[in-house]
Image: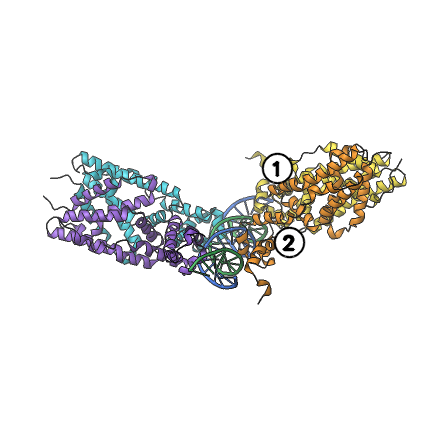
Chain colours: A purple, B cyan, C yellow, D orange, E green, F blue
Amino acid sequence: MKPEMTKRARRKAERPAEILDAAFEEFVKNGYAATRLEDVAARANVTKGTIYFYFETKERVFDEMIRHKSRAFFPELGSYAEELEGSYSSRLHALIVFVYRKIAEDRTSRETLRFLIAEGSRFPDLVDRHYQEFVRPVIDQFEKVIEAGVAAGEFRASPASAFPEIVMSPALLLSLWSMLFGSRKETDITVFTEASIDLIMKGLAAGR
Amino acid sequence: MKPEMTKRARRKAERPAEILDAAFEEFVKNGYAATRLEDVAARANVTKGTIYFYFETKERVFDEMIRHKSRAFFPELGSYAEELEGSYSSRLHALIVFVYRKIAEDRTSRETLRFLIAEGSRFPDLVDRHYQEFVRPVIDQFEKVIEAGVAAGEFRASPASAFPEIVMSPALLLSLWSMLFGSRKETDITVFTEASIDLIMKGLAAGR
Amino acid sequence: MKPEMTKRARRKAERPAEILDAAFEEFVKNGYAATRLEDVAARANVTKGTIYFYFETKERVFDEMIRHKSRAFFPELGSYAEELEGSYSSRLHALIVFVYRKIAEDRTSRETLRFLIAEGSRFPDLVDRHYQEFVRPVIDQFEKVIEAGVAAGEFRASPASAFPEIVMSPALLLSLWSMLFGSRKETDITVFTEASIDLIMKGLAAGR
Amino acid sequence: MKPEMTKRARRKAERPAEILDAAFEEFVKNGYAATRLEDVAARANVTKGTIYFYFETKERVFDEMIRHKSRAFFPELGSYAEELEGSYSSRLHALIVFVYRKIAEDRTSRETLRFLIAEGSRFPDLVDRHYQEFVRPVIDQFEKVIEAGVAAGEFRASPASAFPEIVMSPALLLSLWSMLFGSRKETDITVFTEASIDLIMKGLAAGR
DNA sequence: GATGAATGAGGCTTCATTCAT
DNA sequence: AATGAATGAAGCCTCATTCAT
């Protein structure tokens, strides 16, 4: 009768992801506490009961949603820097651009960051996991490239080497800016990115 | 019996601030939606009804709490840069230190930033106001100093001049870090500050 | 300083009545339960506390308000019919006009009737009192005139004599109409009155 | 276990009516503002939440309750007079008896009238609707019969013809009487009805 | 698997009432 | 006499969660 009802099995397999995608949108819109599971259900075209068939509680929905959205996030991350070639400053440049793409430009990661900031105290495990899986590895990548660059005489032995995350701080600023002022303050991402990379590179560069 | 229960008038004048201070703590702990006004009342040593004597709704309590906490925040801000003397790089240095002190080290401003991120969509006016009163003025200060420094030949004409806020991005990173990972990742603020300033200054410095 | 504050004593003596007048207006506007004593106070230009200085409870305010408004209502009632002269039909005519004036045209009595209907079950004493002081006496007046008229051969011995209040039913209808449909259905009171009296008189008149 | 707990579907279809019936009783007992939805729920053997599953607000419950109770009220009304035969005075007689039955004797309609009087200002739409659906049609019926009767020479061209509702005023008086004085003043409805009809008929009758 | 009616704890808000000043 | 800050009981409404179908 209903053509879209043909592959029931297929639907069934997709349901959880559909629910989590709907949950993402609703949680983005209202935050954790103010989101009603009923609205999540409506957006996913199921009923409240169905959500409880797949997830035990609202907290669980939120937690799984974050996992779901983070899943295919930085899979290539661990090895990205190793594939880079050329001068260390060009490698660092590539790495920063990579981070910008992930952090500042992508809506999902921006909203995930917002979730961590807003609901972190309610979901400390989430924060831990993100630190270990995403933040720490990224910092490590930066650290390696910078240290190697210093060793190679490309970068000076600046005190900033002790805080490699500084080089990604403009990306976070951009992310925050669009999170907070979104429509209010338009920023040309490309130009901003190049400007910040230019500043960082000059800041790190060895004298002469 | 209770010595602090002296003057009714004095209490009345203090009550709103007491309530807003209590509200700050509770909202910090649970976020807007998950905070119960009853807990705010208990923390302020009043009853629920008293809160409603001073504030119309929970939203209003939140809004006024933010105003209250922001009030004496950047009063000297507009004129700070003008009082600075010496080379432009030393002025910029002083300005960055000033911002660090305000943004990265102060718990109140950190949590206010968290509120803006977490509840901004529910309180768009708040975000507007903070942009106009705090963010824009700070950016303007940076812009003036940098432009003057460029004109004086102290700083190079870098593309970063178009985005003066970049120079405060490490401060925001630090603020975010302590917001998110607080206990998990201790950072030596002083060292971090100096490291980031060193990086920024070198990045802006005129060649030769 | 404030000229209206001169005669404090005078104010004091008038306060209760001012409060009750204000209460009347507010109770008319919202009904008993939905009226806030605070609004009554505001309308009377006093504060809530003052109301409690004069009246024990909200119920008491309502009760006294009704008494206050009913006080000078039918003082002449008991003796009105006795002062009438002429034919019984002219006396009845005068009596009906008198009732119309009191019941159908006067806002205070109309709203009092509404109070009795709306809040009667909460204030049974009020209803009792009004029945004994106003309704019963009026009916008795009608009864006397009608009986005398029948005895005199002016009116026929109709079964309606057993229910003298029937002759005032059009007045109540009019009162109800304006209570309910007020603006919706304008009725020319004078014409309506004369029409209903004409009908009643003809209905009571002795044949031939 | 509980035999009445049979079919879920059947319950679902019945619930709203059960709730509205319970609401009627509670609103009758206390009036709109003083009625607690919790008591309505208890009377309907459901919980508070269930009421909100079917109705959006307390106002909505009240509004729908009135609709529910008025629904099968005057369905035959529009055509009743047309089915009447015989002399116009016998038709009018039948019509008045019909109205008595509906208005003065029926508890539901009496309490509905009380609601309109008591809560009319809070629910102006309700008053409008009742005027258009019930009051106006009834008046129109009377008007037609009286005019035809006048044209046929059965009734005189009295000024009361301009206010046909006068003929139902005794019925409203009776309704009011039982609303207000209920137990206090017992009236024999049948006798009262006949007495008032006798009066009205004589009042309208053509001379000779 | 999915539904959606039903539950009930819990939070926001109101307001009659009190009482120190 | 009058004030108005403070109280706290009570009611409306929401929504996560359950469960019979």
Query: What residue is drawn where x is 56% and y is 56%?
Result: D12
Q: Is residue A8 visible?
A: yes
Q: Quadrant of the C terminus of chain B?
A: top left
Q: Is residue C102 visible?
A: no
**Left or right position of C61 against A125:** right
Chain letter of disc 1 in the image: C
Q: Label 1 amino acid?
A: Lys
Chain letter of disc 2 in the image: D
What residue did someone put label 2 on?
D25
Q: Position of residue A100 (x, y in %)?
A: 25, 47
Q: Position of residue D104 (x, y in %)?
A: 73, 47
**Left or right position of D55 against A141:** right
Give the tally of numbered discs.
2
Q: Position of residue C3 (x, y in %)?
A: 57, 34
- Whether A119 is drawn above or below D200: the answer is below
Q: Position of residue A47 (x, y in %)?
A: 45, 55
Are the residues flagged by discs 2 and 1 in contact, CB closer than 8 Å? no
Question: Disc 2 on helix, strand or loop?
Answer: helix
Q: Label 2 amino acid?
A: Glu
Q: Nearer the viewer, residue A90 or C73?
A: A90
Q: Which quadrant of the figure has residue B185?
A: bottom left
Question: Disc 1 on helix, strand or loop?
Answer: loop
Q: Which quadrant of the figure has residue C92?
A: top right
What residue did someone put label 1 on?
C7
Pointer 1: residues within 10 angstroms few (<14), some, or many (20+)? few
